Amino acid sequence: MKKRKVAIISVASYPRIGGMTTWMDKIASSLSDEGFEVTFYALIEEYEEKIFQNKYEVKPVISSMQYPKLLGQYIPKLIRWLKLNLFFLFRDKSIKDCDIIISDMTPGVFSLASRLKNRYKKPLIVIVGGDMFYETQHQFYAKYLHQLLEKLYKGADAIIVDGYDHKENLVRRGVDNSKIKILGHGVDLNLYCANPDSKPFINYLKSNGIDITGKRVILFFGRLAKENGVDLIPDIVKGIPNSYSIIMGKGALYDELKKRIREEKLNVFLTGAIEKGLLISAIGLADVCLFPFRKIAGISQVITEAMACGEAIITTQAGAIDSLIIDGENGFICNVEDVEGLRNTLLKVLENKELKLNIGINARKTIGDDWNLENVKKEYTKIIDSLINCGVR
């Protein structure tokens, strides 16, 4: 039987780090496992061959260019996307041989994928991992960009989102409800196992001069950005006795956090970016995972990964988290920016081992039942087979 060919176009590709990158990689790997022939067109700034040790073919399309500063930030972006469009439309036409196109939701990529869909008459799926309407609302060109995005969404054959908030937002903007599918990222329960071995991360801490013996460990991992509420963590954990907090990741707030931790001599360690094996080991070490989000869209992948490892999660009412976590049953949900409420919940979990254990058991069961990667793979296959069989709308 001839393999079905999938072309994925995305800026969310390694070496870029983030939830969307992990999701797109997971989609490509899952489809390869399910027997699809996958080509990932990675629109990246730099290329390192060692990064791309994947189950699928990666075609790096280098998009970095140097321009005089007097051109500002917008003209170079426009030139970059014009060149990428010309590349796909006239230089590399291999995408015409695919059976279906998958794109991320960034405007440049989505627009390019839509153009290729129409040119080659291929079905198009867009993966929505963020709210571009919200993220660009203060740009001077927001009105026109949002009109373009609405047109693109209406023209896509299927839209995959990870939370009901995404779906409701798109339906309000006139997108056909029937083409929007809520589908989780999927978690590999073998990789994110119950109670991971904490020794590798303990050794990593010791190599950095940190001894957490007898300490209760509070863990955050993810992008260090204001919307993730990571700047609230020093205030939340301040005064919690016999504790040590670990903040893992990179982002805009890294330097600010590093300065505050140093100046206030906080029991907080900032690791920076870290490889996946150490991350999972850190989850195994943690007594509780803290995610004080301000504004997210859908369900954050860091939540599902920590839950899969059987961790007690404390987070906020942001995005579609309440569709995953039942407060007090498989995790805890506090109000956004409620520092006192988050601290009190932390203390409650840290001081009650039986509660922590039961929450962790329920958390892993939730992921196993509803977010198991094996089940998600089958859902992707159903959606893609259906679109290939139906053809372009």
Image (spheres, helix red, strand yellow):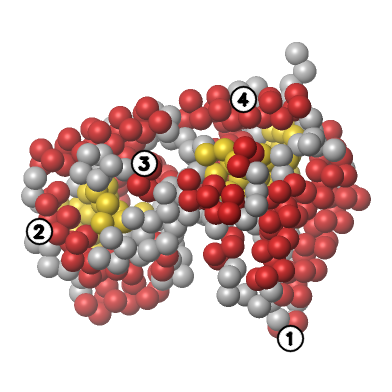
- Residue reaching furthest to the bottom: 70
Q: Quadrant of residue 380?
A: top right
In the image, taking residue 180 as reference, residue 289 lies left or right, namely: left
- Please tell me which residue is depicted at 18% across the width and 66% down the height of the picture: 340
Q: Give whichever of discs 2 and 4 has the lower sequence position.
A: 2
Circle 4 residues within 10 Å: few <14, some 14–19, many ≥20: few
318 w.r.t. 312: above or below: below
Q: Which residue is mark 2?
A: 242
Helix, strand or loop at label 2? It is loop
C-alpha span from label 4 to label 1: 50 Å
Q: Nearer the viewer, residue 113 or 3?
A: 113
- Residue reaching furthest to the right: 90
C-alpha span from label 2 to label 4: 50 Å
101 w.r.t. 115: above or below: above
Q: Which residue is mark 1?
A: 70
Quarter of the image for the C terminus: give it.
top right
Circle 1 residues within 10 Å: few <14, some 14–19, many ≥20: few
Q: Position of residue 276 (x, y in %)?
A: 42, 45
The answer to whether residue 99 is visible is yes
Helix, strand or loop at label 3? It is loop
Q: Which residue is mark 3?
A: 324
Q: Give whichever of discs 4 and 1 has the lower sequence position.
A: 1
Q: Which residue is mark 4?
A: 382
Q: Amino acid at mark 3?
A: Leu
